[in-house]
Image (tube, rainbow, N blue to C red):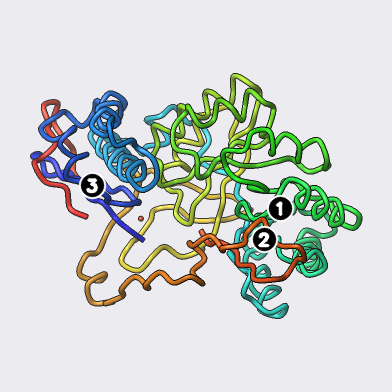
C-alpha cells in the first residue's frame, strides 16, 4: 500500500492512498496553493502531465494528492469529509471481495463466514479460468451467505480482470447462469472495448461492470455511449474528484456507480453524496499495517465516523518497524497480464487472475507546504 502525505504550513496533514509516480512534477502544480481549492488544483495537476499523459500510476498519483487535499479541506472545516461533501447518511452499503482465487474450498468458506458475521450479504469472487470451478466456488459462497441471511438470496458477482474474448465471456457466464444468478460480471473483456462489452451485455442476463482501470472521463464516454456498461466502477486510487465527476456522468445516463479498492476510504466518503451509489468493495476488514481508520463495518455497510477529514492516521514508526518490502514483479504476479490471456482454446490452461492508505483546525489563509512525503 503506497501512502502519500501532504503537509501544510498550518500544521495540518492530509493522507492519500495511492501511487507516487512522478510526484515531484505533479506536486509542483499544488505547491504553495490554498489546499481548499481542491477541484481547481486537480485540473492543474492534469495540466502538468499534459504532454506525457495522465494514464496509469501517474493518474493514481494525482488521485492520491487529490484525496489528501480533500482530507485537508475537511479537517480545515472541522467536519468529516462525508458531511463536507453533502452526505446525509454515514452508512455506505458494501459487498465482500476476498481476492480469493488461491484459497481451498474450506478456506473460502471460512473467509466468507467472517464476512457474513459482519452482515455482508453480497460477494464478488475472482475467476474466469474454469466454468465448473467458478460455479462450484460461487455456490459455496452463496450457501454461506444464504445461511447467514436466514434464507435471503445473496448477491453474487464474478470478476475476471479482462481475461476473455467476447465469445468466451458469453459462453462462460451463460453456463454459470444455468445454475446461479449473477448480479454482475466484472471486466469480461479489455477495458477499452466498448463494442465488446456491449456484445457481452446483450448475450447474458447479468449486468456488465467495468471502469476501475479507466483514467479520465474521456475513457468512460465511449463505453457509456455504446450502452456497454451497466455498473460504472471507479478505483479508489484515482481520487475523490475523479469519482465525483465520473459519478455525475454516470448519473446523467441513469447508471449506478460502485467504488473499487482494498482501502477505498476517500470514495466511501464521496459515495454518501452521490445519488447513484450502489455498493462499495470491502476487501480487508483490517487496515494496512501502520494505518488506522475511523470507521467500522456492521450490518453489511461501512459506517463512517465524525472525525474531521478522512479519519485516517498513519503511524510511520510502526510502518518502519514492520520492515515489509514490496514483492518483486514476476511473470506469475497477479498484476502481470498472462501472455495468452483471451487466447486460450480450453479453460484452465496457463491462466492467472489479477488482485487488485491528520489533524488540527486550520485558519482561513493556509497554504500547501513545499513538501509532499511518500
On the image, which quarter does residue 64 sit in?
A: top left
Q: At x 76% / y 63%, what residue is drawn?
A: 345
For residue 157, the mark is 1
Q: Is 252 above or below relative to 174?
A: above
Between the residue at mark 2 and the residue at mark 3, the CA separation in whole angstroms equals 34 Å
Residue 274 position, x and y percent, is 53, 29
For residue 125, the mark is 2
Q: Secondary structure at mark 2?
A: strand
Looking at the image, which residue sits at the far top? 252
Q: Secondary structure at mark 1?
A: strand
Q: Are marks 3 and 1 in contact (CB under 8 Å)?
A: no
Residue 280 position, x and y percent, is 57, 46
Ranked by sequence position, the earlier of labels 3 and 1 is: 3
Query: Disc 2 vs disc 3: which is toward the camera?
Result: 3
Q: Is 89 above or below relative to 61?
A: above
- Badge 1: few (under 14), some or many (20 or more) residues near its Cα, within 10 Å? many
Would residue 366 appear left or right of 338 to someone viewing this image? left
Q: Which residue is mark 3?
A: 22
Ranked by sequence position, the earlier of labels 1 and 2 is: 2
Q: Are marks 2 and 3 in contact (CB under 8 Å)?
A: no
On the image, which quarter does residue 130 sit in?
A: bottom right
Q: At x 48% / y 62%, what residue is drawn?
A: 335
**Which quarter of the rendering shows the N terminus?**
bottom left
Would residue 210 appear left or right of 290 to someone viewing this image? right
Q: At x 74% / y 54%, what residue is drawn?
A: 156
Amino acid at each position: 500500500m503506497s501512502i502519500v502525505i501532504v503537509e501544510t504550513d498550518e500544521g495540518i496533514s492530509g493522507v492519500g492512498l495511492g501511487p507516487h509516480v512522478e510526484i515531484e512534477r505533479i506536486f509542483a502544480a499544488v505547491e504553495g496553493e490554498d489546499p481548499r481549492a481542491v477541484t481547481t488544483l486537480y485540473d492543474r495537476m492534469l495540466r502538468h502531465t499534459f504532454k506525457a499523459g495522465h494514464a496509469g500510476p501517474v493518474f493514481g498519483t494525482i488521485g492520491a494528492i487529490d484525496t489528501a487535499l480533500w482530507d485537508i479541506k475537511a479537517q480545515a472545516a472541522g467536519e468529516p469529509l462525508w458531511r463536507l461533501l453533502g452526505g446525509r447518511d454515514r452508512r455506505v452499503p458494501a459487498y465482500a471481495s476476498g481476492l480469493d482465487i488461491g484459497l481451498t474450498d474450506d478456506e473460502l468458506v471460512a473467509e466468507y463466514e467472517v464476512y457474513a458475521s459482519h452482515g455482508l450479504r453480497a460477494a464478488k469472487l475472482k475467476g474466469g479460468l474454469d466454468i465448473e470451478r467458478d460455479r462450484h466456488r460461487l455456490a459455496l459462497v452463496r450457501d454461506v451467505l444464504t445461511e447467514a441471511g436466514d434464507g435471503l438470496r445473496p448477491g453474487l458477482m464474478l470478476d475476471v480482470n479482462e481475461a476473455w474474448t467476447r465469445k468466451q465471456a458469453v459462453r462462460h457466464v451463460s453456463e454459470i447462469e444455468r445454475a446461479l444468478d449473477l448480479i454482475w460480471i466484472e471486466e469480461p473483456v479489455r477495458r477499452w472495448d466498448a463494442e465488446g462489452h456491449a456484445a457481452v451485455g446483450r448475450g447474458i442476463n447479468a449486468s456488465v461492470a467495468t471502469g476501475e482501470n479507466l483514467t479520465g472521463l474521456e475513457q468512460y464516454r465511449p463505453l457509456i455511449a455504446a450502452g456497454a456498461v451497466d455498473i460504472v466502477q471507479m478505483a479508489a486510487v484515482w481520487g475523490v474528484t475523479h469519482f465525483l465527476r465520473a459519478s455525475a456522468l454516470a448519473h446523467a445516463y441513469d447508471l449506478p456507480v460502485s467504488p473499487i479498492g482494498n482501502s477505498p476510504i476517500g470514495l466511501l466518503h464521496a459515495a454518501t453524496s452521490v445519488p447513484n451509489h450502489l455498493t462499495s468493495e470491502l476487501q480487508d476488514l483490517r487496515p494496512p499495517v501502520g494505518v488506522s481508520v475511523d470507521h467500522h463495518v456492521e450490518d453489511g455497510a461501512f459506517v463512517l465516523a465524525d472525525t474531521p477529514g478522512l479519519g485516517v492516521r498513519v503511524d510511520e514508526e510502526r510502518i518502519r518497524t514492520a520492515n515489509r518490502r514490496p514483492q518483486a514483479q514476476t511473470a506469475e504476479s497477479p498484476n502481470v497480464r498472462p501472455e495468452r490471456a483471451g487466447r486460450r482454446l480450453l479453460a484452465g490452461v496457463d491462466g492467472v487472475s489479477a488482485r487488485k492508505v491528520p489533524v488540527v483546525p486550520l485558519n482561513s489563509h493556509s497554504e500547501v507546504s513545499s513538501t509532499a512525503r511518500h
